[in-house]
Image (spheres, coloured by chain):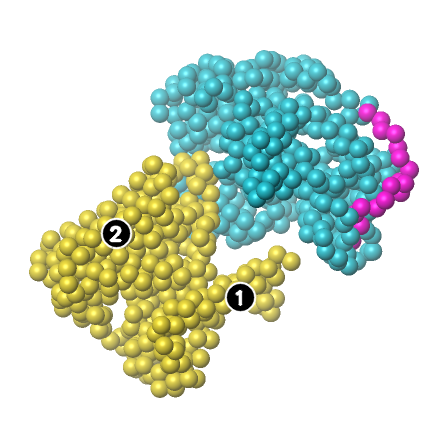
Chain colours: A yellow, B cyan
Amino acid sequence: MKNYLLSPKFMRSALPGVSLAILLMAIFYTQPRAMSYFGLNLMLQYTVPIALATIAQMFILTVNDLDLSIGPFVGLTACIGATLLQTDPVFGVMALLACIAAYAGLGALIHWRNLPSIVVTLGMSFVWLGIAVLILPTPGGTAPAWIKAIMGFKVTFQLFGYNVVPPFPVFAAAIIAIVVHLGLMRSSYGVVLRGAGGNPRAISRAGWSMLKIKMTMFALAGLFGVLAGLSLIGLTSAADAHIADRYTLYSIAGVILGGGEFVGGRVSPAGAVIGAMTLTLAGSFLIFLRISPDWQVGAQGGILILVLALRALINWREAR
Amino acid sequence: MSSPSGNIVSLSGVAKSYGAVRALVGVDLLVDAGECLGLVGHNGAGKSTLMNVLAGTLVPDRGSIVVSGGDRTANYKVSLAHDLGIRCVFQELSLCPNLTVAENARIFHPNLKGWGWRGRAGRMIIGKLDEIFPNHGIADDDVVGDLSIGKRQMVEIARAFTVTDEPLHLVILDEPTSSLDAVTAQQLLTFMRKVVGEGRSCILISHLLGEILGYSDRIVVMRDGAVVAEKPAGAFDRNSLVAAMGDVADEDKIEAHERIEKARGETPVVVRACPQTAGNGRELIAHKGEIVGLAGLAGHGQTRMLLQIYDAVGKRTASTDVAGPVSLVAGDRQTDGIFHLWSIGQNVTVRSLRSMVRGLLIDPAREKAQAEEWKDRIKIKTPDMANNILSLSGGNQQKALFARALGSDAEIVLMDDPMRGVDIGTKLEVYDLIRQEAEEGRTFLWYTTEMDELHNCDHVYVFRNGRIVAELSRSELTEEKVLQSSFEESAAS
């Protein structure tokens, strides 16, 4: 048992959770009042959209691609959600489905023409942003009431006779992690999808269609991007074309923090969600430390480097 | 399923060209039910291309494919080949390193799904591994990337023999024993005969002529993309087989070549290394101009020893002393050896770029000159060294890696079982080159799993469980002694 706990394999998978726990403890130490239902809810409220965007990015990274357009894409779906979906639900839903289809099309294009995904998605990020500005030139719009209701949902259940009220973001993040874990890590087709990142040639030699796999992964990324956009306006109740620009880098950092790798199909949905949580909490922590917002991005980068250095250390120990 | 004639597969007139290179020029091939067909030929003779056509991963330019009596030429592809019971173990491994052993089995079987698939896949693959390689030491939840190359090959082979509900008629084994040690290779070949005895067929491709002669029923020899000879295995012997492949040199030359045995220790010591996991105090010593062999079963610390020496260059460590620049010829060339996106020339010259710098830039003329020099010296089979490295056959890629090491300034060359899947003609050329270089003062440390290659060495260290357990000079070296030291422990327990 002790050997297992000290094995690099276990330490690597435990690292995302441990970093989150350390960060939480640091927050509670500097600001004990954060240790409440209200405090956690407030600190973690943006976890849900960021976690969804991180999962979207993770699907792309699984097949050795990178999506530099997820931020503007989430912004676009937020704009659609706050305008078309509110005024004309049928048209709004169709527009969101078209967004997902466009993502699947990108996957097909990247596979078919053997294009670098970085270039394609970088180009597309301007397209998404342009469409978003066309739909909603100035910040505004209204989020549909049902989305706000979902995001404001209060979960309660009975445990050993006590009423347990977990903060909604934590509850939602757990649901996201479990659903994606079952789909990608445990299901039989999920194995094929991950295998496509590990050794695409072996997958096509076993008779699977790489085109179909790429389209599936990009469509899933599109779906989670849409969900991220909708959950975001559920919190802000209005939208802006630039509302999620920072999500591109957040999502990449979240996947990597959570133990994922850029190539080779090594990803972890639970880790990615924890990574997204760590990033959001890092923001709050820096505010509690009264670090000026100018320095915050840099300080978040510092936290990222620290965690990655620990991982490198574990890998180095394993290699010895 | 099988047709009355008993043919499982009949290929006729299959041709395939890559640009100007004609890989196959119209090949006919018949495989009967319950037969093991041996397929031999030089590197680049077209064996792998032909097998890719048969496995459905390559579409031929011309020719027809008849499987179990039905013409399947139109839209023949991998999934159809699989449904018709044709499986292939490819020369470069086709496992996903990020997945577990059980998950890799699932990749292979589209209908392995639904509730509990993971358990079923695990039991199936481990059951087959137990059957072929008893005491394999592989678990169904091991991640493939963490396994040694030999174990990965075992998984891949076992996977090809697993059956869910589609038939299994023909398994193609392309260099299956290249990463296996003598014992597991024997287990595999014995299992293959058993499968053939049950009425299934195998195609065995190997550069180890003993395997081909001893285990196949019929032998097909390929040269330059065509079948040049086809006879029952009994009608061939080693020499006639080598002759049919077009080798002028026969294999006895290895034995015949007697080096003047130098008294060990006349030249200075250039490498002194003690295995880090050791405990018996034995260390490896190489003198200048020596060819030192690292023997033993696959994966018993030989590669780790080479890497330890490689890492120790320019540092002073307690366990390792290395005098002089070192270069390494990788054995797992897909992962550790070649740069996939670079040309052949760039792959050859990368180790020597420092000597080609003029001002701040690399001198392209000198780079090209070195590439051309080695194209001729080591006979790399390509029209142009500027072509991508992947346009070469496996053996020629390996030659390029040798050229990289030998063309550099390295005084010590480490070789990590580099002759895997290389044909006998190429081997003989490279052996000559190594001896020549050794006489000029280079030192070679050579890990090999093949007995024939150890006969080229001046001094041999046998490894077991990460330790040096025996030390044999050239005159003492026999296969029995090496095997005996490799197994001592298991024999004692």
Magenta span has B273? yes
Label 1 sits on a secondary structure element that is: helix
Residue type at numbered disc 1: Leu
Q: Is residue A176 left or right of residue A310?
A: left
Numbered label attached to residue A126:
2
Question: Percent position (x, y) of residue B335?
Answer: 56, 42
Q: Is residue B483 left or right of residue B391?
A: right
Disc 1 versus disc 2: distance between alpha carbons?
36 Å
Evaluate whether residue B427 shows in this view.
Answer: yes
Q: Residue furthest front?
A: B359
Highlighted range, magenta: B257-274
Instruction: Tell me the quarter of the image containing the N terminus of chain B.
Output: top left
Residue type at numbered disc 2: Phe
Q: Which residue lies at the image location 56% right of the left edge and 41% below the top edge?
A: B361
Q: Image height check: is B316 above or below B77?
A: below
Q: Which residue lies at the image location 50% right of the left edge and 20% below the top edge?
A: B21
